[in-house]
Image: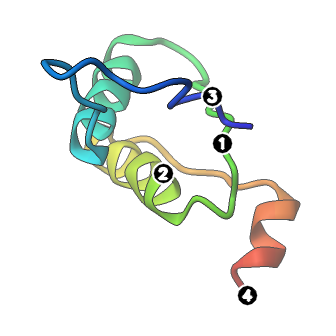
Amino acid sequence: MEGSSLGRPHAEERFETETDIENRLLDVMKTTSGMVLVACSAQNIDRVVSVYRAAKRSGRQLLVDAYGRRLCP
């Protein structure tokens, strides 16, 4: 279980969009020296794309483990 949506938000709350998540990832990638590690399901294509876009925008190189690579031949 990824854990990004446990429970339901109150009426005035909302889930983060992938754009929100991408921008948070970008901030972390820009302000962190050294390697940034992200753990998410390789089957969650929207999340993988958000990580890829944040890495590209920050000038970082994206590496995907062998498990993820087998799902995306």
Residue at the spot of label 1: 40
Q: Which residue is mark 4?
A: 73
Please, what is the three-letter code of the amino acid marked with disc 4?
Answer: Pro
Which label's residue is closer to the chain start, 2 or 3? 3
Q: Position of residue 28 (x, y in %)?
A: 38, 18
Discs 3, 1 touching: Cβ within 8 Å:
no
Which amino acid type is marked by label 2? Arg
Residue 55, x across and y down, in percent: 40, 44
Q: CA distance from mark 1 to mark 4?
A: 18 Å
Is 37 left or right of 33, judged from the image as shown?
Answer: right
Q: Which disc, if any, is residue 47? A: 2
Question: Which sits earlier in the primary sequence, circle 4 or circle 2?
Answer: 2
Question: How far, Cα to Cα, is label 3 from label 4?
Answer: 27 Å
CB within 8 Å, label 4 to label 2: no
Reading the image, the residue beneath label 3 is 3
Q: Residue furthest bottom?
A: 73
Q: Are dots 2 and 3 in contact, CB under 8 Å?
A: no
Q: Nearer the viewer, mark 2 or mark 3?
A: 3
